[in-house]
Amino acid sequence: MTKIATGGHPDLKMVNPAAAAIDIGSTIHMAAVHPDACYTPVRFFGTFTQDLHDLADWFEACGVMSVAMESTDVYWIPAFEALEARGFDVILVNARYAKNVPGRKTDVGDAGWLRELHSYGLLRGSFRPEAEIATLRA
């Protein structure tokens, strides 16, 4: 029996070439853009307000239009709001759906993998109510 090779799926079409991803952490955020967009496609940023502005500036310089972020706690909220205010299409991905793929053991690998999944349209965002509703719910 011949072994079927996996990977390199020519039938998959990239639906979001200007995609980026962020693996959100409590002290740093690992962000990834398409390798052709930047000399260093994966970078880390701090969690303070200026760091989030620097992250948004880097995304703009790389031509990013859409961002997927993964977080297991509430650390995503400031980054989500800062990027959304700058005009990016931002989705929050449930970590449970993206973590079950083997071979990614570092934050750098997670960010790159999330970007790739997002560029092919394979991630679904969690429900996030509009700003007015979120204020009422809080």
Image (tube, grey):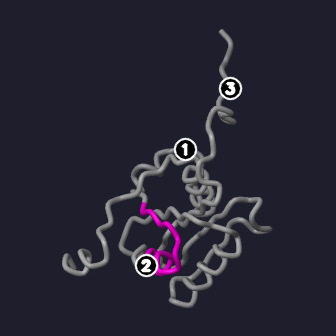
Name the residue tied to disc 2.
81
Label 2 amino acid? Answer: Glu
Q: Nearer the viewer, residue 50 or 102?
A: 50
Q: Nearer the viewer, mark 2 or mark 1?
A: 2
User: Magenta part of the protein: which range?
Assistant: 80-92
- How packed mark 2 is, by other alpha carbons closer than 10 Å (few <14, some 14-19, many 20 or more), is some
Q: For residue 5, which numbered disc appears in the image?
A: 3
Q: Is residue 16 above or below residue 33?
A: above
Q: Is residue 2 above or below residue 74?
A: above
Which tag, 1 or 3, sits closer to the chain's start?
A: 3
Q: Nearer the viewer, mark 2 or mark 3?
A: 2
Say whether residue 87 is magenta: yes
Q: For residue 84, which numbered disc appears in the image?
A: none
Q: CA distance from mark 2 to mark 1?
A: 31 Å
Label 1 amino acid? Answer: Pro
- How packed mark 1 is, by other alpha carbons closer than 10 Å (few <14, some 14-19, many 20 or more), is few
Q: Nearer the viewer, mark 1 or mark 3?
A: 3
Q: For residue 102, which numbered disc appears in the image?
A: 1
Q: CA distance from mark 2 to mark 3?
A: 42 Å
Q: Nearer the viewer, residue 126 or 64?
A: 64
Disc 3 is placed on an element classified as: loop
Task: Residue 100: give x, y in percent of width and height.
Answer: 46, 46
- Is 35 positioned to the left or the right of 106 in the image? right
Label 3 amino acid? Answer: Ala
Q: Nearer the viewer, residue 47 or 13?
A: 13
Quarter of image, res 10: top right
Q: Nearer the viewer, residue 109 or 94?
A: 94
